[in-house]
Image (cartoon, rainbow, N blue to C red):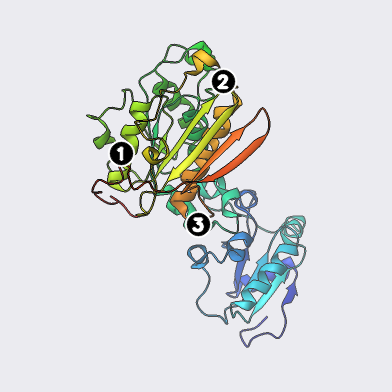
Amino acid sequence: MGSEGMSAIQSVSPQQALALQAQGALMLDVRTPAEWHTGVAPKALCLSLASLLNGDEQACQSLPADKNTPVMLVCETSQRSQQAAGLLAQRGYRNLAVVSGGMAAWRTHGLPLEQPPVDEAALRYDRHLRLPQWGHSAQQKLGDAHVLMVGAGGLGSPAALYLTAAGVGHLTVVDDDTVELSNLQRQVLHSTETLGQPKVKSAAGQLHALNPLVKLTTVEQRLTADTIDALLAGVDVVLDGSDNLQTRYLVNERCQQRGIPLVYAAVFQFEGQVASFDFRQPDSPCYACLFPPSQAAEPANCSQVGVLGVVPGVAGTLQASEAIKLITGIGESLSGHLLTFDLLENRFRRLVLKKDARCAVCSKQTIGPQRQS
């Protein structure tokens, strides 16, 4: 394995790899963060195969600029390192070798190991980083984002849990209610041990335990016209998990005015609906286009008509998914659509929404987006 270049990808034994490394060759470990945690070859560069496959330029910046640099690739056996070597060859690297038997053989021969610096975020979000549509750039966008969650009940519970687990940078949860025993059938953010506590305090304990890397702000008050403007400052996406029309119309109007995407959801017995209003787009409809105030009736409360516990779980999880897509730009969001579902009959429908020229909210002058995401 010399600097003169190679016509084919070579194979070297673990002992040869150690000797070549001492002569200046780069050891590239293409396993996953979880595998790196079990030990790596001394001074090895850790760059997962998923990052190479995704063409993740942020992660690949650590590769040597000189394409003649001798690079030895290692995985747990040899399969992934062969694939990674092919990818590097496509990038123009001409001096490549695969460590035969991988780290399994390395350990069998008793060769030295070291612990890499612990990258908690890389390990925590490893399954995200393996996604071909994702990579470090999408995870970074999510980590830079601020989401406002209105309500910590049936909808807010799954939404907050999944956004926190996914690694949203800053989550603000607003709710003025306390945890009651009848909540626990569907509000999975709370527990028997937190009965009687403010929901935001109960939520804070659960969310911090789930992911301490997320900045969490809790606001124990009802969202009103006097408080909403301060809460929207610096927010990238709003999730509406409220259960009354006054709050829904207020959140919709202020988000529309500021160009902040809004994800709405509502549930009724066995049914639910979810919609995204991407107010960064000038042609986006709004909640008032869908439900004009003159025609709207206050929704029936689940304490009166009941609700299957998993229904808000589905709707809230869809809200979290929508927020993630709006933040990262991956996939197709529900912007301009209403998704309805009936879990009793297992029916899902997606309806097209159009901006209503007569809508009192959309006809007002907008301020425009506060932040670009």
The x and y percentages for residue 179 are: 45, 15
Per the image, label 2 sits on a secondary structure element best described as: loop
For marks 3 and 1, the one nearer the N-term is 3
Q: Which residue is mark 3?
A: 136
Residue type highlighted by circle 1: Glu
Residue type highlighted by circle 2: Val
User: Given this view, does label 3 or label 1 mark the residue nearer the observer?
Assistant: 1
The x and y percentages for residue 285 are: 39, 46
User: Given this view, does label 2 or label 3 mark the residue nearer the observer?
Assistant: 2
Q: CA distance from mark 2 to mark 3?
A: 39 Å
* Residue at the far bottom in the pictured view: 4
Q: Which residue is mark 1?
A: 253
In this view, the residue in front, 115 or 254, is: 254
**Residue under the image location 48 percent in, 55 percent down:** 138
Per the image, label 3 sits on a secondary structure element best described as: helix
Q: Quadrant of residue 94?
A: bottom right
Q: Residues within 10 Å of mark 3 (few under 14, many from 20)?
A: some
Q: Which residue is mark 2?
A: 307
Q: Residues within 10 Å of mark 2 (few under 14, many from 20)?
A: some
